[in-house]
């Protein structure tokens, strides 16, 4: 046992999760200073301005949609889902990595997660907010969204509880609520730190109200630890269930190319794949701009790249299994659907997605790539594009060409489809950079526990 | 019982080890009404202070059971009693189709119970607490560790308790006003 401990300790010294030389004070000051400083980096202003500009594009597209109706999008029967559901599935998948990092890695005792979980959880929240926009807007009359919930009404009707689309309403709204709660519980001790350190009276007041009087008492911490573990235990099956339910939207339908039983694990793996790509896309520039390389170290980037590679391989396996299933089933409609994907009107998108999702990420096998932030950033962007194309191909190519040749029809996105999609990227950027400026992007108290000084030395007997 | 003139005595420490040792020492001396404050959770402290086991898991379990029942019974009521739809003679009580929403509501109610239970057990939100009267206490959320012995403790004696805390490798000891 003693030997084992020594080996583990040596291993930790070789590649530390947190760079050596930090103390409780410096960790606190460095992370809190991003929020409490008066100076705002040009990088932040530029990103926030870009996000805000795209947010205005989004609002413009939404107002036009409300005035004119969903006809301004390219959705025409049979492709009634088009961009809206593609973007919904893509965004909600991105959110999954945040919950994976905050909940599953907490249960597995992977302490390296402590310096990336806060902003990954924020990413989840904002990605779910963007995802939620699409089904709402796709309804055509978003102001009647409450019709999806069961409530006593004068119309005398109720939701169809046997439909995956109703399950989706419950799954996504539960996911958004639980993610928000988990994030806030983790924030309380750090809000107390900001309250105690803010110089400005207003800031002290606002952080003080949000911290609710947290004083770091041993009793508080004991309950807080239990609550975090329980919430992690609840969020773990929840996150797996959300993309499973999203995949049910497809598998329960009889459309060729959708109707298969392995969609749930395939969708969950794809979700984590794109989510980790987004984590890297956000973490790499942030650590550089804010000089946080000592807290978000090369080890974090490398571990995330490894998770990306592993889930990417699961996705590759799923693509192969999909083709095998179509062939082995002997179902001519299934085989035709996949032949159409590979050689039909959407062949370009299909091969592009294979390149982005399967071929390109193979460079992550090389340690040189995994340890070079620039390469890692680029391969993450490629994965995000690839995963978007995957959702697009699954939805559009299957709907455009189903059983009856006479009802085939191509999908042509309009400029409002693009404006809404790019607009949600703006909404995400806007919210994310607000968060960076107003709340600590790294969990201060969890990073303190990673420092060697945090260990209580037992007195010799 | 009359209210003691002060809330208690607060000692400040440099590192978690001193705090845990001080908390153990205070327990050995027989002090019962004490609390420790630290900028991050310290497992050894829970045991040193003899804190009772958290009741939160029970609350979460109750929340989960209530959520699951709510989800299942709501669907049963709607699909079997309130709004039955006959689809090719299929059974109205189609329980496999209820599982997803039952699960989601179980998680939702359990998570709400966890968060509101946490706040209730910690007594938050609490707008005022005497320890905040000490300006140096702001460091409890940065890099300092505090131990407070409350004046309501039967063994509490202003001079003796202060002297005891000062003997414990504390940086500073001060009285906390109400």
Image: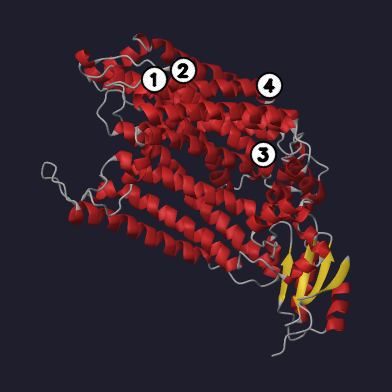
Q: Chain of mark 3?
A: A
What is the C-alpha distance between the residues marked 3 and 1? Answer: 34 Å
What is the C-alpha distance between the residues marked 4 and 3? Answer: 22 Å
Name the residue carrying label 2.
A353
Marks 3 and 1, the one that precedes in the sequence: 1
Frontmost of labels 3 and 2 is 3
What is the C-alpha distance between the residues marked 1 and 4? Answer: 29 Å
The picture places residue B9, in percent across and down from the top left corner, at: 81, 75
The picture places residue B175, in percent across and down from the top left corner, at: 83, 75
What is the C-alpha distance between the residues marked 2 and 1? Answer: 9 Å
Q: Is residue B160 above or below residue B21?
A: below
**A348 or A371, which lies in front?**
A348
Helix, strand, or loop for circle 2? helix
Report the side of A266 relative to B159 (left or right).
left
Name the residue carrying label 3.
A436
Labels 3 and 1 touching (C-beta < 8 A):
no
Please identify the quarter of the rendering in which residue B46 is found.
Answer: bottom right
Marks 3 and 2, the one that precedes in the sequence: 2
Which mark is on residue A115?
A: none
Which mark is on residue A374?
A: 4
Q: Residue at x 77, y 60 (%)?
A: B140
């Amino acid at each position: 046992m003693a030997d084992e401990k020594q080996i583990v300790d040596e291993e930790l010294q070789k590649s530390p999760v947190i760079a050596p030389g930090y103390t409780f004070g410096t960790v606190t000051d460095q992370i809190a200073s991003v929020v409490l400083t008066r100076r705002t980096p040009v990088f932040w202003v530029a990103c926030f301005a870009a996000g805000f500009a795209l947010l205005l594009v989004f609002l413009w597209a939404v107002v036009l949609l409300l005035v004119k109706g969903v006809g301004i999008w390219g959705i025409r029967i049979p492709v009634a889902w088009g961009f809206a559901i593609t973007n919904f599935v893509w965004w909600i998948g991105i959110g999954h990595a945040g919950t994976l990092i905050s909940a599953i890695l907490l249960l597995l005792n992977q302490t390296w997660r402590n310096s990336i979980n806060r902003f990954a959880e924020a990413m989840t929240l904002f990605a779910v907010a963007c995802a939620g926009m699409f089904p709402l807007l796709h309804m055509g009359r978003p102001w009647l969204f409450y019709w999806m919930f069961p409530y006593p009404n004068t119309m005398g009707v109720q939701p169809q509880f046997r439909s995956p689309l109703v399950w989706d309403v419950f799954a996504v709204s539960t996911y958004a609520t639980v993610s928000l709660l988990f994030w806030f519980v983790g924030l309380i001790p750090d809000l107390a730190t900001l309250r105690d350190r803010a110089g400005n009276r207003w800031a002290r007041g606002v952080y003080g109200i949000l911290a609710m009087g947290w004083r770091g008492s041993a009793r508080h911490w004991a309950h807080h630890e239990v609550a975090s573990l329980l919430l992690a235990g609840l969020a773990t099956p929840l996150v797996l269930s959300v993309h499973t339910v999203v995949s049910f939207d497809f598998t329960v339908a009889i459309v060729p190319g959708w109707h298969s039983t392995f969609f749930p694990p395939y969708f969950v793996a794809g979700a984590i794949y794109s989510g980790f790509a987004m984590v890297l896309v956000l973490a790499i520039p942030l650590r550089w701009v804010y000089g946080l390389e000592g807290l978000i170290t090369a080890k974090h980037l490398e571990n995330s790249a490894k998770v990306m590679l592993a889930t990417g391989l699961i996705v590759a396996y799923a693509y192969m299994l999909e083709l095998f299933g179509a062939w082995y089933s002997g179902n001519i409609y299934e085989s035709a659907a996949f032949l159409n994907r590979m050689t039909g009107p959407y062949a370009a998108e299909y091969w592009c997605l294979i390149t982005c999702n399967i071929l390109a990420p193979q460079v992550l096998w090389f340690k040189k790539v995994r340890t070079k932030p620039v390469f890692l950033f680029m391969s993450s962007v490629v994965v995000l594009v690839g995963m978007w194309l995957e959702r697009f191909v699954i939805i559009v190519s299957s709907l455009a060409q189903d059983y009856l040749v006479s009802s085939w029809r191509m999908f042509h996105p309009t400029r409002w489809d693009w404006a809404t999609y790019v607009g949600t990227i703006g909404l995400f950027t806007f919210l994310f950079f607000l968060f960076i400026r107003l709340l600590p992007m790294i969990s201060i108290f969890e990073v303190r526990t990673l420092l060697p000084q945090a260990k209580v030395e037992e007195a010799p007997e | 019982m009359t209210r003691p003139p002060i809330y208690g005595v607060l000692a400040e420490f440099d590192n978690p080890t001193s705090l845990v040792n001080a908390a153990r020492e205070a327990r050995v001396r027989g002090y019962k009404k004490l609390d420790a404050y630290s900028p991050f959770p310290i497992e050894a402290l829970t045991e040193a202070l003899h804190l009772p086991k958290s009741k939160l898991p029970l609350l979460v379990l109750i929340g989960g059971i209530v959520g699951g029942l709510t989800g299942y019974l709501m669907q049963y009521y709607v699909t079997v009693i309130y709004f039955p739809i006959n689809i090719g003679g299929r059974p109205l009580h189609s329980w496999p189709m209820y599982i997803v929403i039952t699960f989601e509501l179980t998680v939702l109610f359990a998570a709400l119970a966890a968060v509101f239970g946490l706040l209730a057990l910690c007594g938050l939100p609490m707008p005022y607490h005497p320890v905040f009267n000490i300006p140096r206490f702001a460091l409890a959320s940065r890099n300092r560790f505090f131990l407070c012995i409350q004046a309501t403790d039967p063994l509490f004696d202003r001079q003796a308790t202060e002297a005891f805390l000062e003997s414990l490798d504390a940086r500073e000891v001060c009285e906390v006003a109400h």
